[in-house]
Image: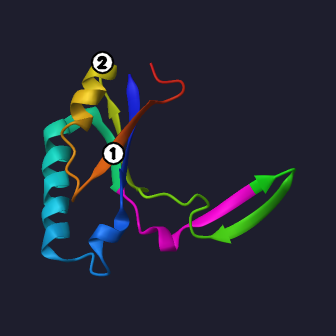
Amino acid sequence: MQYALLLYEDETIYGSDRSGPAVKDLLAKHVALRNELGPQRLFSSGLKPTEMTTTVKIAEGNRTVHDGPFAEAREQLAGLYVVDVPDLDAAIAVAKKFPLLKNGSIEIRPLLGAA
């Protein structure tokens, strides 16, 4: 079954320098996890900071474009993985392995149409 694993983290913990040693260490841990998952990992990517976000809002048939994320939150979507594992328990086991720089959460959602 295919699951999206959505990584949420407070991006302010990274500060303005996203190339510092803590971030480089975190990225190295993600590379190691991707290698460990092998063919179970169908896709993965981090996301640029929310200041680079554009949101299209649709209300009553009207579409408006906004800079930045539409929802204010303490945690922002930082990245995602798509994995192909036997069941939810296996997806939870993968999610428990995720490196986060400090605090965060991983949302697990089955993909529509996934077997």
Camera-side residue of 35 and 19: 19
Q: Residue furthest front?
A: 74
Please state the extent of the stretch shown in magenta in the rendering: 46-57
Residue 55 counted in the magenta span: yes
To which residue does mark 2 refer? 86
17 up-or-down from 111: above or below? below
Name the residue: 28% across, 20% down. Answer: 89
Q: Are marks 2 and 1 in contact (CB under 8 Å)?
A: no
* Amino acid type, residue under disc 1 in the picture: Ser
* Amino acid type, residue under disc 2 in the picture: Pro
Query: Could you tell me residue 81's position as x and y percent?
Result: 34, 44
In this rendering, would 59 be left or right of 25?
right
How many marks can you see?
2
Occupied quadrant, residue 53 = bottom right
Name the residue: 87% across, 51% down. Answer: 61
In this rendering, would 73 be left or right of 64?
left
To which residue does mark 1 refer? 105
In this rendering, would 45 be left or right of 39?
right
Name the residue: 22% across, 77% down. Answer: 19
Question: If the image is split into quadrants, where does the N terminus sit?
Answer: top left
**Mark 2, mark 1: which one is toward the viewer?**
1
Query: Could you tell me residue 62's position as x and y percent?
Result: 85, 57
Question: If the image is split into quadrants, where does the C terminus sit?
Answer: top left
| N-term mark: 2 or 1 | 2
